[in-house]
Image: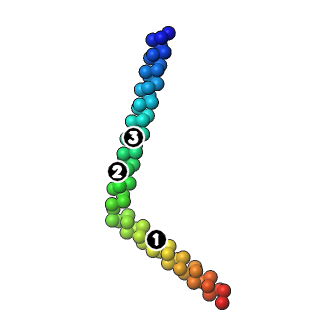
Amino acid sequence: MEDHEAALKTWGLQQKNQRKQLLQADILTNNSVYKALSDEEELYAYKQNMARNLMKLQADSFYKKQQQML
């Protein structure tokens, strides 16, 4: 009975450690991927262009609302 309990306890600790290691590996991988993406000029240029377009739309919308108030 004690051997069985010890085996279960050991197995449980192994599973816990494996989950912890998998989580750490996943975090490292994600950090590496997002770091690489943040360094990409193409992605930066795309986001900059999208933000510029959004700001233009917001300005146009504000202008139209102001005109309607007159």
Residue 24: numbered disc: 3
Q: Is residue 65 left or right of residue 56?
A: right
At numbered mark 1, what does the secondary structure look like: helix, strand or loop?
helix
Give the position of the C terminus as an image quadrant. Answer: bottom right
Vertical arrangement, residue 37 with respect to residue 44, above or below = above
Residues at discs 2 and 3 in contact (Cβ within 8 Å): no
Vertical arrangement, residue 1 with respect to residue 60, above or below = above
At numbered mark 3, what does the secondary structure look like: helix, strand or loop?
helix
Q: Which residue is mark 1?
A: 51
Q: Earlier in the sequence, mark 1 or mark 2?
A: 2
Which residue is the extreme one toward the bottom? 70
Q: Which residue is mark 2?
A: 32
Q: What's under tag 1, amino acid-wise?
A: Ala
Vertical arrangement, residue 10 with respect to residue 28, above or below = above
Q: Position of residue 17 (x, y in %)?
A: 41, 31
Q: Using the numbered discs, state the Cα–Cα distance from disc 1 to disc 2 in whole angstroms.
A: 25 Å
- Frontmost residue, 36 versus 20: 20
Q: Position of residue 12 (x, y in %)?
A: 46, 24
